[in-house]
Image: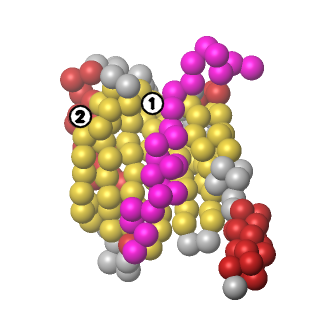
Amino acid sequence: MTKRLLPLIALISLCAVAGAQPWAEFKAREAGFGIKFPTKPKTEESKPGDPKGVVTLTSIIGDEVYLVAYNDLPDFDGALPAIPGLLETSKNGFAEGFGGKVVSEQKIKLGPLDALEVMVRDPGGLHARGRIYIIGRRLYQTFVFNPTSNANDVNAKRFLDSFRLLGPADAG
């Protein structure tokens, strides 16, 4: 019986591997970061050429949306003591714009830099898990949107954990 099941198991395994989405790092050199997306992201600019414009990168797989948004903060002087307040303002602005409620938040670090991880849920059952960073005079937000039942999805963690700042070795 085991000998008869082995080809079936091998076929199922092969189909699962063939259907898996290849994750690849996307490097936004002009914005100074890299992050792994499940598919090539679509890039949009809210106000092309405007220093206050927001750039978004999105990738959609099934019922999950992977998003990075970044924009410059021209009125921010880069003072480290102001960062916790800016993170708080960004978190609240995101939750309000999403139409949801912050259900958890945790202070985190990106190297030596303070950041914030948040979970937001809307009344319809959509869930957003993300991280907010302020690096220099730039705000970065990485979020995964999915049904609440997938709130701690391994792909969400994979995406969020892959965000990194690019260094000199990444040039070119």
Q: Is residue 42 visible?
A: no
Q: How many marks?
A: 2
Please identify the quarter of the rendering in which residue 133 is found. top left
| Residue 136 or residue 104, whichever sits in front | 104
What secondary structure is marked by label 2? helix
Q: Quadrant of the C terminus?
A: top right
Q: Is residue 136 visible?
A: yes
User: For the residue carrying disc 1, how many other residues have a C-alpha within 10 Å: few (<14), some (14-19), or many (20+)?
Assistant: some
Counting from the top left corner in percent of width and height, residue 123 is at: 32, 77
The residue most toward the bottom is: 1
Please identify the quarter of the rendering in which residue 4 is found. bottom right
For the magenta stretch, what is the residue range? Answer: 149-172
Instruction: Say which amino acid is labelled 1.
Output: Arg
Q: What residue sits right under mark 2 in the picture?
A: 84
| Tag of residue 63 | none
Q: Is residue 87 above or below residue 125?
A: above
Residue drawn where x is 47% and y is 58% of the image: 154
Instruction: Say which amino acid is labelled 2.
Output: Pro
Q: What residue sits right under mark 1 in the picture?
A: 138
Q: Is residue 94 above or below residue 9?
A: above
